[in-house]
Image (cartoon, rainbow, N blue to C red):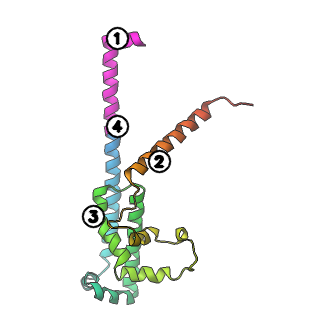
Amino acid sequence: MIEFLKSTEGIWAVVIAGIALLFTGYQLIQANRLRKYEFADIYVQRYWAIMDQLTAEQKQKLYTGDRARELIHDEKVRNILWKYLELCEDQADLRAVNMINTATWKQWRGGVEMASNQPPYSVILDEFMKSFPADAADKDLPFARLRSARVEPQPYDPREAWWIRLVEGLVNACRYLCGLRAAGSPKQN
């Protein structure tokens, strides 16, 4: 093996293999970015499908603070606002599992924070949460991410810190490699 690397052909083979490895890594990074943009596009379309159900007057009330509370008395509008709450929860879920990039999350974060803290969304969320027993475990209740956005320091980001993701990735890689080694080793009696 060492003799091969001392030859010109061996050096070129290693250089070409290295370039191929770098190119493959670059393609994987680009594919991951594209996947994140595709997810973001789906959720933007979902957002507009929800908002297009509101009239101009309803949208104006929605953006004027206290007058927004009037909207929760209209059942049709209440259902639309409920869909928006679900969208915000789904967006935060995607961010938590790193399916949305930071630039997209910065755009969405304001809507998620608003939905968790401002009327009429917060009124609907509060009324819904009152329907659960007071002693219910927090993890078993719906809208966990929106509820977290209320209590966590702003700006809210459900994704773990980079160093936690790195450590978890290394641990998972070790588990995977150990699992492969264990699967390939002969059985002991």
Give the vertical position of 98 relative to 137 (above or below).
Answer: above
The reply, left or right, for residue 118 in relation to residue 188 is left
Mark identifier at residue 25: 4
Residue 11 lies in the magenta-colored region:
yes
User: Helix, strand or loop at disc 2?
Assistant: helix
Nearest the viewer among 135 and 182 is 135
Q: Please name the amino acid that badge 1 sits on.
A: Lys
Q: Are marks 2 and 4 in contact (CB under 8 Å)?
A: no
Give the vertical position of 176 relative to 73 (above or below).
Answer: above
Q: Please name the amino acid that badge 4 sits on.
A: Gly
Residue 80 on image: x %, y %: 37, 79
Of the image marks 3 and 4, the number of the one nearer the N terminus: 4
Nearer the observer: mark 4 or 1; the answer is 1
Structural distance between the alpha carbons of marks 2 and 4: 21 Å
At 34% from the left edge and 37% from the top edge, which residue is drawn?
25
Q: Please name the amino acid that badge 2 sits on.
A: Glu
User: Helix, strand or loop at disc 1?
Assistant: helix
What's drawn in magenta, residue-wise?
Answer: 1-26
Structural distance between the alpha carbons of marks 4 and 1: 27 Å
Q: Which residue is mark 2?
A: 168
At 31% from the left edge and 34% from the top edge, which residue is drawn?
23
Structural distance between the alpha carbons of marks 3 and 2: 27 Å
Mark identifier at residue 107: 3
The reply to whether residue 173 is in sight is yes
User: Helix, strand or loop at disc 3?
Assistant: helix
Residue 189 on image: x %, y %: 75, 31
At 29% from the left edge and 87% from the top edge, which residue is drawn?
66
Give the vertical position of 101 relative to 180 (above or below).
Answer: below
Of the image marks 3 and 2, the number of the one nearer the N terminus: 3
At 30% from the left edge and 69% from the top edge, which residue is drawn?
110
Q: Which residue is mark 1?
A: 6
Nearer the observer: mark 2 or 1; the answer is 2
